[in-house]
Image (spheres, helix red, strand yellow):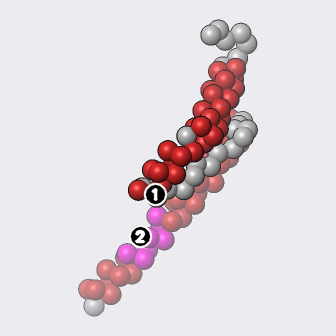
Amino acid sequence: MEIKKHYCEVMDIVDKLFVTMFDSLNASCKKELEAIGRQYPFEPLKYLRKTLWLTFQEDVQMLKLIASEYILLVFLQCKGKEAIDSKKQM
């Protein structure tokens, strides 16, 4: 395979490849998946027909949001632990 213009060409092909593989497995291996599910219960694989692609700016914005939520969570956990430790010392 040759990339003619942009690496997104490869992403398109890999995207279609995985959707096709998952569709094929679900269709042609239905009995086998049911047998495995009886012994090892699992939920059916969920996937989007069209893969979500984000721009660099959208990725950065999402990471900033996640980072701020994570920092807040760590802060609150530390404050809670400090409160518990101070009660133990009393």
Extreme residue in the bottom direction: 90
Q: Residue at x 41, y 70 (%)?
A: 78
Front position among marks 1 and 2 = 1
Question: Considering depth in this image, is 61 or 46 the residue closer to the camera?
Answer: 46
- Which numbered tag is attached to residue 78? 2
Q: Residue furthest front?
A: 31
Stretch of the chain drawn in magenta: 74-81
* Residue 42 percent across, percent down from the top left: 49, 56
Above or below 77: residue 50: above
Tell me if 78 is positioned left or right of 51 in this view: left
Q: Which residue is mark 1?
A: 38
Quadrant (top left, top right, bottom left, bottom right) of the C terminus: bottom left
Give the number of the disc on residue 5: none
Is 59 colored magenta in this rendering?
no
Residue at x 41%, y 56% (from the top left corner)? 39
Q: Earlier in the sequence, mark 1 or mark 2?
A: 1
- Of residues 88 and 51, which is closer to you in this image? 51
Residue 12 placement: quadrant? top right
Neighbour tally class for label 2: few under 14, some 14-19, many 20 plus, Cα within 10 Å? few
Q: Position of residue 81 (x, y in %)?
A: 37, 75
Q: Can you see residue 64?
A: no
